[in-house]
Image (cartoon, grey):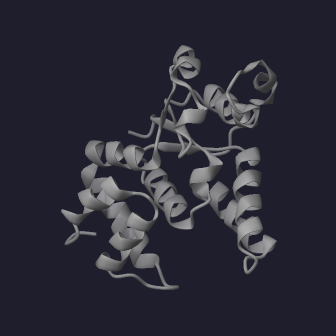
Amino acid sequence: MDSFTAVVDSCVFYSAPLRDILLELSGEGIFRARWTDQIHDEWTRNVLDNNSHIKPGQLARTRQLMDQAVPDGLVLGYEHLIDSLILPDKNDRHVLAAAIVARAAVIVTFNTKDFPEHTLKPYGLKTQHPDDFLISQFDLARGPVCRAIKRLRSRLKNPPMNVVEYLSNLRQQQLLQFEQRLQLFKNVI
């Protein structure tokens, strides 16, 4: 199961609840989450720009914990490919370069239109919206996903969330299909 590799775009890591889910599933061995320092830089910069109450040190600690949670998560040696890649937004080329070097199967992003299919196809890549990605992981590994979600939810302390609150939070994260699927298993999560 853990050989399936996904590069996670910075827009996905921006959301702490979604970031936690993906890291928990990767830690469970359901898939291999991968990212770069540049992806880290983007999501942390955006979080800091939009949340004055969050301090840089808090996010530096989060980055460190992410890198520890998924020891092989950080993709290195992709920079040489960036200038040779063509995407609608040249600022996304580093994500594609990382996915190529990581031999990923998918780029998980909210911005699927920024990674045209014809550009990704030669590299055996596709994009998936986080909700679609989580549904596919759930369909492949229902038990491990439910265990990971239960473990994640049980660690929430500030604030703690019961199942109903947690599922409501998933809806707020644009994870509507995933939330609906988990509704059927709310007695075990």
Nearest the eye: 22 or 12: 12
Image point (33%, 42%), residue name: 136
Residue 4 position, x and y percent, is 45, 35
87 to the left or right of 129? right
Image point (39%, 57%), residue name: 175
Nearest the eye: 26 or 181: 181
85 to the left or right of 134? right
Q: Is residue 179 above or below residue 40?
A: below
Nearest the eye: 92 or 63: 92
Q: Is residue 30 visible?
A: no
Q: Is residue 37 above or below residue 179?
A: above
Q: Is residue 61 visible?
A: yes
Image point (69%, 28%), residue name: 97
Image point (51%, 23%), residue name: 117
- Where is the N terminus found, in terms of image quarters? top left
Q: How many marks?
A: 0
